[in-house]
Image (spheres, grey):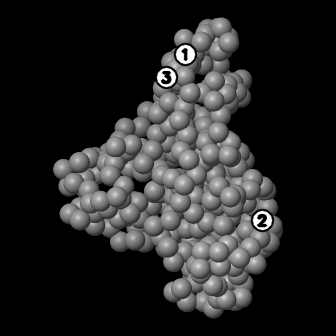
Amino acid sequence: MRFPILLAAATLPLCAFALKSYPMPNANNDLIGRVQYVHPEQGDHIYQITRRYNVGFYEMIEANPDMNRHSKLSTDETLKIPTQYVLPNVPRKGIVINLPELRLYYFNEAKHVVQTAPIAIGRFNWKTPEMTTRVIRKQKDPVWVVPKSIKEESARKGIHLPDVMPAGPENPLGEYMLRLGNWSYLIHGTNAPNSIGKRASSGCMRMFPESIEALFQAVPIDTQVQIINQPIKVGWENGELYMEAHEPLHEAAMSRHEEYDYAQGVIREMTQDHPMNVNWRKVDDVIEASSGIPTLISQGKASGPTPDLERDSSLLHGEIEYTVPNDYE
């Protein structure tokens, strides 16, 4: 079992966590990293914390629901830094982007490490789609050929974009770009780092400038890219079962019962060859909190079947409230 570390919030260079690397766990383990607890520095806002520790805006809000997102933070408060992750339940290959988590994983086989960083994804009306594709091109200092749809939307807001925007500090693609096999979608940098960890793009995936630079250097052409939708992840750590829950994408919102059914299915899949007793009330608590923090849900080897929610309605406590799209922008 992993225990959190209490860290002082010493000033760290931005490159310190540009693309955080963890040893690749063996096939029987699915957790990487550790939760950290820190005190803000004098004058810190949430955006200094997210960039310093390479976590996303909504990851920090999920882990610290009472955190002030609009003004300076107190140096007396203790913040939970959600830097422990259950790996997505897909083959550990290439780049994996989990949309509800707003996070990218790169399974670097050459170095036998998992590298991860927060991302921004498409807004509610400019969705980033689920797909399996590949990196087909890498470009430093990209030129942005502005799509007609984006030009038209910007014009309605009184912003008139050129047909082509040259490389430079005003270019929203940043300094590095990976083009995917689906030509319309990119993984790129940004000139708006405060957007990382939000639904803020027109469908592409943005990264902190230092994160995309590190990914650009690490990823070869033809690397597989899986874009998935797993609001609930379940995985093993030293024979114990952990669960990590995030708020589902607004357009895929489920009732509380549907979300619990979804979790049940994921747990059943993970335990079909390794029976365990599961604390189903703890599962319900994890769903309700949706803190993004891996939480122990097992309690020894199984002695009976998985409970049927239709017959055990005492585990359900009404409906979850979902964030409206404007809260992501």
**Left or right position of 88 against 50:** right
Q: SS at mark 1? A: helix
Q: Which residue is mark 3?
A: 282
Closer to the eye: label 2 or 1? 1
Answer with the quarter of the image where residue 256 lies: top right
From the viewer's perspective, tell me whether residue 235 is left or right of residue 137: left
Tell me the distance, in whole angstroms, between the alpha carbons under discs 3 and 2: 38 Å
Q: Position of residue 307 (x, y in %)?
A: 64, 12
* Three-letter code, disc 1: Leu
Does residue 93 appear in this view?
Answer: no
Q: Label 3, secondary structure: give it.
A: helix
On residue 315, the disc is 1
Which of the image's four quarters has the N terminus?
top left
Label 1 crowd (10 A; few <14 / some 14-19 / many >=20): some
Where disc 2 sits, the SS reads strand
Disc on res. 134: 2
In the depicted view, which residue is nearer to us: 207 or 136?
Answer: 207
Q: Nearer the viewer, residue 99 or 126?
A: 126
